[in-house]
Amino acid sequence: MLLEINPLVLPDPGLLIWSTLAFLILLFVLGKFAWKPIMKAIGEREKGINDAIASAEKVKAEMAQLQSDNEKLLAQAREERTQILNEAKAIKDKMISEAKEQAKAEAAKIMAETQQAIENQKMAAVVDLKNQVGNLVIEVSEKVLRRELSNKAQQETYIKELANDIKLN
């Protein structure tokens, strides 16, 4: 049995030629008028996509740089804050120590003035005591001389009596 080919399946040679000729004309017209604009549009689109990718990469790099700069600024701000706090603490400590020194100097001055006042009062008391003792000696001497006693034992008794009468403050 031979394969029989159905005549409906076999292409007609004229149809085949006309179909080929139409295809070649369509190919020529498309190549002449449509291919260049289509390729140009595809090239422009490719260029646009590449530009967008390059722009995105550039923006990404700029964002990374900005983030790096922000981190540097934050670190610098933290360092400045720490420095300002340290300076403020140093100034506070200095002010406290100066106030303490001033208070010590003022206390020493007051102590010296108080010591001087005590010395002055002490000297005044000693001078007053000497004056009183001198006055008492003069009074005792006057009384002894007024009473001209001939007996030495009587004089000693009288002096002891006078000494007992004197009250020291």
Image: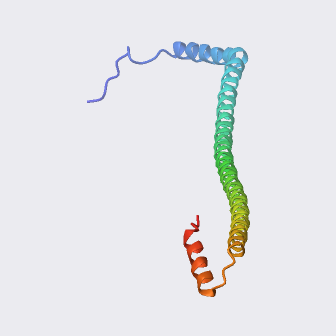
Q: Is residue 106 above or below residue 3?
A: below
Give the number of marks: 0
The colour scheme of the drawn protein is rainbow
Q: Nearer the viewer, residue 63 or 55?
A: 63
Q: Nearer the viewer, residue 142 or 43?
A: 142
Residue visible at 67% across and 33% down?
59
Q: Nearer the viewer, residue 3 or 56?
A: 56
Image-quadrant location for residue 105: bottom right
Counting from the top left corner in percent of width and height, residue 143 is at 68, 71
User: Residue extending furthest bottom?
Assistant: 152
Counting from the top left corner in percent of width and height, residue 64 is at 64, 41
Image-quadrant location for residue 151: bottom right
Residue visible at 38% across and 14% down?
8
Q: Is residue 101 above or below residue 64?
A: below
User: Residue extending furthest front?
Assistant: 150
Residue visible at 56% across and 68% down?
165
Image-quadrant location for residue 148: bottom right
Q: Nearer the viewer, residue 73 or 164?
A: 164
Counting from the top left corner in percent of width and height, residue 141 is at 71, 74
Image quadrant occupied by the C terminus? bottom right
Q: Is residue 55 left or right of residue 10?
A: right
Q: Is residue 147 above or below residue 60?
A: below
Image quadrant occupied by the N terminus? top left
User: Residue extending furthest left?
Assistant: 1
Q: Is residue 33 above or below residue 121?
A: above
Counting from the top left corner in percent of width and height, residue 91 is at 70, 50
